[in-house]
Amino acid sequence: MPAERHPDQGAPKTVSPTGRTEREGLLGGDPRAQAGDHLTTAQGLRLSDTDHSLKAGRRGPSLLEDHHLREKITHFDHERIPERVVHARGAAAHGTFVSYGNAASATKAKFLAEKGQETDVFVRFSTVLGSRGSADTVRDTRGFAVKFYTDEGNFDLVGNNIPVFFIQDAIKFPDIIHAGKPHPDREIPQAQSAHDTFWDFVSLHTEATHHVFWNMSDRGIPRSYRTMEGFGVHTFRLQNADGDTVLAKFHWKPVAGVHSLVWEEAQIAAGVDPDFHRRDLADSIENGAFLEYELGLQLFPDTEDETFEGIDLLDPTKIVPEELAPVQLVGKLTLDRNPTNYFAETEQVAFHLGNLVPGIHVTNDPLLQGRLFSYVDTQLTRLGGPNFPQLPINRPHVPVNDNLRDGFHQTAVHRGIAPYLPNSIDGGGPFTSEDGYVEIPTRVDGPKVRENPASFDDHFSQAALFYHSLTPIEQVHITEAFTFELGKCYEQAIKERELEVLAKIDTGLCEAVAAGLGLPAPKGEPVAHGAISPALSQIPAEPGPITGRIVGVVAGPGADVDGIGKLRKALEGAGAVVRVIAPHGGNLGREIVERTFLTARSIEFDAVVVASGVAETPDAGDIKARILLLEAYRHAKAIGAWGDGATVLAGAGIAPGPGVLLGDAPDKEFVAGLVTALGMHRAWERADAVMASEV
Ligand code: HDD
C-alpha cells in the first residue's frame, strides 16, 4: 500500500523541528539528507511501500528478491562505527573565533595575528573514560577539542579542562587508559575512576598524582561546558613573522566563570539526566545564551633548557602558575550553533595535533610526540580508511590540493593523470609555496635512550601546590572525593599505597582520608610546594556574570503571576533563564509551566525561588517540591521567596541565612540580591552548617 501523506502533514521539513539555530551552508546540502519529497532507494528508485516486505502470499515467507528490504536492513546493520577508544562520550557546537590581534608579536598564524580575523570553529567536549552512552556528570577529565578552519588550513587544539596529564610519556597511555576503563572481567564500573585498577595504577605510577588531584577537585565535575576552563596542556613553540620564536601554553577562559557541581548533584544527574551537559550546551545555544571563551597564551622565552622559573616546560605534569606567567588574552570564541546531525558532525569529527598552521609548532614533550602518531592512526579504524579528511566536518575551508589518491570511501573525482611530483604532464603542479609550512630547525642530538630528564622525577610538588592554593571548602571536596573513590576499592593494599602518596602532599588531608577509610594514616614528610597560586581556586572573589544560569520559580494556582513576569524580565535581561515549576503542566495565567514537581529536580537550577501565593495551595507541602528546595539548599545554591512564599521555605525547614533571600515582592532589591548570589555561584558560607546538619 502506498505511504500517503496524512492530511495533518504539512510541507516536508528540511530542518529538525527544534533546530532553530541551524544555518545552511557549512556542511553543504546533500539532497539525500531528507530534503526531497519522495522516498527512494539508495539508487534513487521511488518506492511505493516501505512498511511490508515482499512475501509469497499474505501469510507466506519473505522473498530474497526484495531488494528494498535487504538494502534497508543491511544499511541499518552497519549504521554504527566503533566509538572512540577514549573520549567516546561527547557533544559539540559550531562557532566563530575572533582574534584581538595582539598575538602578532608571538606568532604569525594569521587567525591569531590579524586583528578582527574571524575563523570558523567546531568544538567537541567529552568525558574520557565512559562509553558513548555514559552519563555526562561522572568524575572525570573533560576533553576540549577545537578545530579552527583557518585561511591557512585546519589547526586543531586538542586539549582538556585540566592543564596537566597523568603521564609524561605517550608510551604509558595504553596503561593509564586500561587502568581507568572498566575491569576487563565484568566490565564495571562505567565511566569513572572509583575502582581498584585505576587506583592501583596511579598509586604505583606517581607521576599521575598532580592530574589525580585535579580530578578529585571540583574540576572533575564541571557545572557545564559553559563554565569550564580549557588547556592545551603541552608547551608549543610559536614563531612570528620575523622568525623569532617563543614557547607557549594555550588556555581557554570561560566568560561565564569557572563553576562546578557538587558531588551529590553530579551523582543525582547521572541518573536523573545523564545528558546533563549535552542538554545544557544545546539548550544554551537555543536560548541565545551562547558559550564564550577567551583564548589566552602564557609565553616563555625559547631558551635552550626549555624551562621557566625552574619548571620544565616539556613535562606535561607541570603547570606554570599564572602569577609567574600571566595569561594574555588574544581572542574570543563564541559557540552559537548546534550541529545539524550528531553522527555527521560530532561523531565523525577527527582531531589531530599534527594539524598545524605556520607560526605554531610542536615541541619535544614526549607526550605530545606520541600523540602526533596516535590520532591519525585511530581515525583509520574508527572512520574506516584514509579519506576521513574529506568528511564534511573535517574538510578545511580552503582549497585542498594534495596528491593523495583512492582508498576506502574516496569521494573526490580527481582530475589529471599525474598525481606525483615532479611531473611534466599536468602542468608540473601543484607547486610548493614560499609561504608554506616550514619546521623550525631546532637542534636535535643525543644518544638514543629510553629515559626522562631528571626534572621529570618531581611527582609531588605541584600536586601540593594545587591543593594548598585552594580554599578550605575546595579542600574539603578533595578530601571527600579521595575518601569516596578509595572507599570503592576492594584491595586494602591499594588504599594504603595511595595514603602513602597523600602523606607526601598534606598530613591533614592524609589523616582525614585515612580516618574515612578506617585505616591508620602513614607518617610522611609533605613535600615543599613554594608560593601558592590563587588563580588555581575557582571560587570567585567577586560575583561573575549570570549568562545562561537557570532559576527555577516554584509556583502553582494562586501564585503571583505578575511578580513572576517581573522577575523573569529582570533576570532574562541579565542573561539568565527562568523556568516555572508547578504541580501540573500547562499555563499559570501568562506564564508557561516548563517543569512540574514530577519532572523538576534541583540539579537543573542554579537558584530556586518560591513565588508568593503558593503557600495556601494544597500542593505547597508536596514532598517533591520540598526535596527540590532542600537539595538546592543543601547544595549551597541561592534560595529565595517573596510574600508568603517564605512560609513554604520555612515549612521545608529552610531558615534565613547566607544565600537565602526573602522579600515582599520581586522588586529591584530582591532581583539584585539574587543576581549577586547567582554570580557567586554558591553560598559556601552555609556549607559547613548545612553539610553537618540533618537538612
Ligand atoms: Fe588524546 C582523543 C585530549 C593524551 C590518544 N584526546 C582525545 C580527545 C581529546 C584528547 C580532547 C577527543 C577528541 C574528540 O573530541 O574527538 N589526549 C588529550 C589530551 C592529552 C591526551 C589533552 C594529554 C595532554 N591522547 C593522549 C595520548 C594519546 C592519546 C598520550 C596516545 C598516545 N586521544 C588519543 C586517541 C583519541 C584521543 C586514541 C581517541 C579518539 C581520537 O583520538 O580521535 O588517538
Image (cartoon, helix red, strand yellow):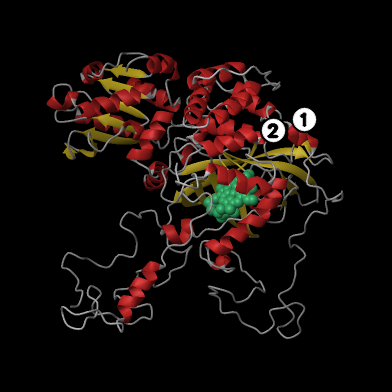
**Residue 479 spot, x, y in % from top left:** 52, 23
In the visual, does 677 lie left or right of 450?
left
Identity of the residue drawn at 18% across and 40% down: 585
Question: On screen, 431 above or below 19?
Answer: below
Residue closer to the observer: 127 or 45: 127
Q: Residue at x 41, y 43 (%)?
A: 135
Residue under the image location 19 percent in, 38 percent down: 590
Q: Disc 1 marks which amino acid?
A: Glu
- Which quarter of the figure is the N terminus placed in? bottom left
Q: Residue at x 52, y 58 (%)?
A: 349
**In this view of the protein, can residue 457 be seen by the observer?**
yes
Q: Is residue 282 left or right of residue 404?
A: left
Q: Answer whether residue 332 is visible to the viewer in this image.
A: no
Q: Position of residue 208 (x, y in %)?
A: 63, 36
Amino acid type at circle 2 is Val
Q: Quadrant of residue 166?
A: top right
| Mark 2 crowdedness (10 Å alpha carbons): few <14, some 14-19, many ≥20 | many
Position of residue 316 in the picture relative to residue 692 (left or right): right
Q: Residues within 10 Å of mark 1 (few under 14, many from 20)?
A: few
Query: Residue 538's x, y, as percent?
Result: 53, 28
Tell me the quarter of the image containing the C terminus: top left
Residue at the disc numbered 1: 309
Label 2 vs label 1: CA separation? 9 Å
In the foreground, 215 or 77: 77
Q: Nearer the viewer, residue 524 or 646?
A: 524
- What x and y, as percent, mark residue 182? 49, 44
- SS class of the residue under badge 1? loop
Circles 2, 1 touching at the beta carbon (< 8 Å): yes
At mark 2, the secondary structure is loop
Q: Which residue is mark 2?
A: 320
Instruction: Give the mark nearer the N terminus: 2 vs 1.
Output: 1
